Amino acid sequence: MGTPAKEGAPVTLTIDGFDVTVPEGTSVMRAASEAGLQIPKLCATDSVEAFGSCRLCVVEIDGRRGTPASCTTPVAEGMQVRTQSSRLKDIRRGVMELYISDHPLDCLTCGANNDCELQDMAGMVGLRDVRYKSGKNHYDISGNGTLAQGDARARAPMGDLGNPQYIPKDESNPYFTYDPAKCIVCSRCVRACEEVQGTFALTIEGRGFDSRVSFGAKTDNAMASDCVSCGACVQACPTATLQEKSVIELGTPERSVITTCAYCGVGCSFKAELNGDELVRMTPYKHGKANRGHSCVKGRFAYGYATHNDRILNPMIRDSIDEPWQAVSWDEALSFAANRMRGLQEKHGRRSIGVITSSRCTNEETFLVQKLARGVFMNNNTDTCARVCHSPTGYGLGQTFGTSAGTQDFDSVEHTDVVIVIGANPTDGHPVFASRLKKRLRAGAKLIVIDPRRIDLVKSAHIDAAHHLPLRPGTNVAVVSALAHVIVTEGLMDEAYIRERCDWDEFQEYADFISNERHSPEANELLTGVDPAELRAAARLFATGGNGAIYYGLGVTEHSQGSTTVIGIANLAMLTGNVGRKGVGVNPLRGQNNVQGSCDMGSFPHELPGYRHVKNEDVRNIFEDAWGVKIDPEPGLRIPNMLDAAVEGTFKGLYCQGEDILQSDPDTKHVAAGLAAMECVIVHDLFLNETANYAHVFLPGSTFLEKEGTFTNAERRINRVRKVMAPRNGYADWEVTQLLANAMGANWQYTHPSQIMEEIAATTPSFANVTYELLDEKGSIQWPCNESNPEGTPLMHVDGFVRGKGRFIVTEYVATEEKTGPRFPLLLTTGRILSQYNVGAQTRRTANVAWHDQDVLEIHPHDAELRGINDGDFIKLASRSGETALRAKITDRVSPGVVYTTFHHPDTQANVITTDFSDWATNCPEYKVTAVQVSQSNGPTDWQEEYNAQAEQSRRILPAAE
């Protein structure tokens, strides 16, 4: 379309004799495109605002002098436009001649051959000759004006051959190249970096003929710059200046499949582009409603793990964990697993085994795993990593609003005026959403950050938070209550909204509680470490600044009072009337691609699909009728309970699909002890992960590229996952679960995931109208999707809360049992980094390790100086649970007394440090508050060396001949 879409009153104009009606503010170029009339262009693309630099898109307009650029000219009522005339053709051909005169003509060997807009436009304007003689140029090493760049490079010796304008190709980035010789200085890459991504890593340096794209300082290349490798510049580039290395190596793709990214909870839509069954590149799908054509380094480039040599493609078994693995057939592995699990139930009872579902697998696969527990194992021992991260969201929002999910879609951020980001780091954890948020902030919205660290959103390119409240880890409830105290005591709440939409009696009780002076910012300063004046100013801004939206992450939920904080956030939103319209709401940022879906599908031991308690007979009847079995009315075991029971000797078998609890769950030593005590651990995954060290059966999994299904993202959006290539292991994950169920006596007969979705829709009210046909028609749907909302629900609680009246709940601060003291005086909190994902099993097997090849500990200069620690030193990190060693990074991003690390690398095993304290309502682990000490070290700890030795022995695989 050339330029972005606009909203406004309809305007009718005539283009080449055709009447066209478009919204006010639309460019002439886009209007022509909507009428099916294409105008030549090079600097224009619909992902960025019009620039008007290439002058190829000129048109004639009656009553106007000259030939204006159609990309920068807005439509007007009655306008008469001509896109074709001999005059326009001569101008366009002349402009194109100038471009080509300083461009190498090595099209046949160019990486963009058959995918080059410059090539296309030369054909479109009818360019058949270049009248300009060879001379001063940017593409020829020798400076002799050789047009065939490839020939010049092949025949000339290396080194400076006398052309000061020539700059060699920059290949520093692992995923794309930058070739200045092919740059036409259209500025599309610069504008994409600014407008779409918001990083401002690129600029145009020089003037006139000396103009060129630069990654910042003259000494910077792509890798050394601020570039975050989102791919927006590559996507925008009309030539081979910025080109994927995969395309250069594998050729221009010839077919594509639209699917959904399997990394974070944003749920970006992508076009997987292939040659045959070989994936060449992933390009963001511009009609994707979550990402709107944008991407991050993980989704755009980090898919190489799918073909990594570490991937296990054949089932394996062993009798005990000290033996090497033996590859066997699928039938033998499934028979081995089924006999062991049945034997354990016969000996120890039907509740002696259980399952763990995955937030990385599809809704359909997760539904089948919990069905395996309830319909085949005949118990409710099912849990998921979603409980380990966001179960307080389900509890807190369920209690206050009546539904266990976020209230908005991502588009809503474009209408917000004040944003609170609490306990989340969107630029690293949810980068595509962060780009949309930054765009809104640059347009004038205000930002309040509540985080112990100075995250990038506090201050970065053209972004400056109005308020940063650097609270002490573990004091979320106190800070949120202090914000509410200011709003209530200063009369800033929206009384009309509260009276209409909420329970007024409960509000009065809450107001009496929160008005108490002990909740004031001043009374809590010593506890929270937050400046009272700054906190009061933040509260006033949120209450009076217009549309207010709250976005939060694991820094809220992964606390002993995670559920209480979520309730406090809901209270804040209701206090200020910020629920039920665009630009407002309470929005949990989910950490993995299907965290929301795994919760929806009944992965918790006390809830069936749709968040309905297993004790309710009417709910059990629905599934008993559908499955033909009796469902146990007793809630099952959560993961910590499974591990405790295993150590006690009552829990004996586990089927773990797509989850690495040994690396991701807290208190690694306790997890290892529980797994070691089990007699049959079945790991169903892509790689021999850390949990597989204690497994007896390994069932190879399939990647998101090899399956059909759906993911549900953080905004409740159900997106289709489509098979891009055949499963390398032979089966999609849902097929493996079905094979195991049938080996244990079930008679499941699914032949396609769409049949599983039909069963989900028939048994789960919020999915009642969801079908693959509707998803294909609409692109995606946000639940609830039922008779009342047949095409889904972008915004929740518009006319009233799901539970009826919004419920205010008292949020008493209770200090965590994890205390600092003389032995452990520092507080450790954990998080993620942009280039890595969760436990790193996928991203560590890609070129993303170029940015983050090890976990490091961030420590404040004051704390480092006291301990004699220098930047890059090996340090020992110790807590009451365990100790590990890693390198130090001295930074003032963290406050004195606080240290921070990531958990992406198993060599570090950061969770050996974390404790088994958890949220009072949901057992969500308290990852974010651990009392620690930091001291000098000369290398890995004894525990690390013992762990690595055990892991190495456990991963032995017998050669096929044996």
Image: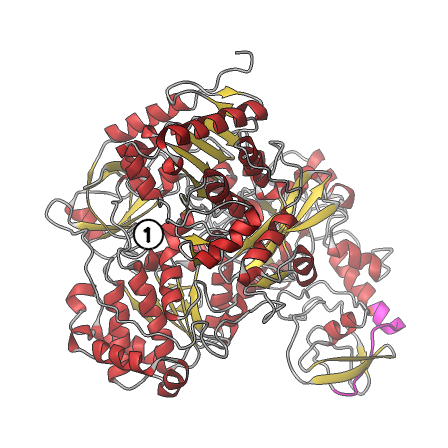
| Residue 383 visible in the shown view | yes
Write down the quadrant of residue 150 in the picture: top right
| Residue 205 visible in the shown view | no
Give 690 or 240, whichever is nearer the viewer: 690
Residue stretch rendered in magenta on the structure = 77-90
Query: Where's residue 378, x and y in %?
Result: 45, 41
Query: Where's residue 548, x and y in %?
Result: 41, 76
- Most extreme residue toward the right, as rendered? 86
Q: Residue at x 41, y 85 (%)?
A: 500
The residue to which callout 1 is attached is 924
Query: Where's residue 860, x and y in %?
Result: 24, 52
Q: Residue at x 34, y 27 (%)?
A: 948
Q: Does 534 appear above or below 848?
A: below
Q: Is residue 359 left or right of residue 147?
A: left
Q: Is residue 654 left or right of residue 166?
A: left
Magenta stretch holds residue 79: yes
Give 792 or 354, whichever is nearer the viewer: 354
Q: Is residue 915 left or right of residue 760?
A: left
Q: Is residue 436 left or right of residue 520?
A: right
Query: Where's residue 365, x and y in %?
Result: 55, 45
